Amino acid sequence: MTDNDYSNALTAAEKELEALSNQAAVIERRRAQLQQTISALRTLTNVAEDEERTLTETIRIVVKGAQAHISAADVLKGVQAMGVTFSGKNPLSSVVTILARLHKAGELAREISGSGYIWAGYLKRNLPPLSAVPMNTPGDAWKMAVDRKKAHESLNKK
């Protein structure tokens, strides 16, 4: 083999690795969305989670599952839809504190206006938008949970 052959093989391997890394990031995002949906459905059906998650882990899942920048209020909704309960008086404050810590650690990036967060790995990979693929977002999981709960409550009233 010549140096040119090795160079071509190296280039091909680097391109394939980059493509696989991008696919892994897309899969990671979809896994987070499914984890949110499953947690919301388990909450609605009173099925216990297989494993306990910390609030930080749950927030990571919500942010990873977002299709774009997500506000702290929407993160809170997503966390609540996953069945997390708060003992304190201001759950939004807890979420904001953890988001700030994750941002400082480099796990999250802030929107230029400062109003939302996104998983930093998605920006580094410059992933394409997922709007072409139907997926549940944190807001969808939350809306589905609330709608189901309302339907269940209205059935119990009858």
Image: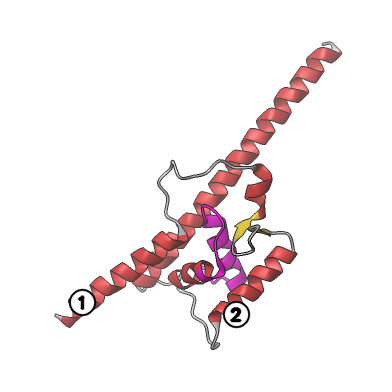
Which portion, as a residue range, is magenta? 51-73
Callout 1 amino acid: Ser
Task: Give the colour scheme shown.
Answer: secondary structure
- The quarter holding residue 113 reads bottom right
Residue lying at 76% horizontally and 18% vertically, measured from the top left: 8
Q: Quadrant of residue 47?
A: bottom left
Going from the N terminus, do you reach mark 2 or mark 1 first?
2
Mark 2 residue element = helix
SS of the residue under disc 1: helix
**Residue 9, how many percent across, how many down?**
75, 20
Numbered mark located on residue 93 in the image: 2
Q: Position of residue 86 (x, y in %)?
A: 52, 82
Q: Quadrant of the C terminus?
A: bottom left
Question: How dense is the environment of label 2, judged by Cα within 10 Å: few (below 14), some, or many (20 and up)?
Answer: some
> Given the current orientation, which residue lies at the most extreme left position?
158
Find out whether residue 61 is within the magenta segment: yes
Residue at x 82% of width, y 13% of height: 4
Q: Nearer the viewer, residue 125 or 5?
A: 125
Query: What residue lies at 54% left-to-right and 51% top-to-bottom?
Result: 29
At a point 60% along the width and 78% down the height, the residue shown is: 94
Q: Is residue 153 left or right of residue 8?
A: left
Neighbour tally class for label 1: few under 14, some 14-19, many 20 plus, Cα within 10 Å = few
Q: CA distance from mark 2 to mark 1?
A: 32 Å
Residue type at tag 2: Ser
Q: Quadrant of the N terminus?
A: top right
Where is 59 relative to 34, above or below? Answer: below
Task: Tell me, for residue 154, which label it has, or none.
Answer: 1
Percent of width and height locating residue 39: 44, 66
Q: Nearer the viewer, mark 2 or mark 1?
A: 2
Q: Residue 82's spot in the image, x, y percent? A: 46, 69
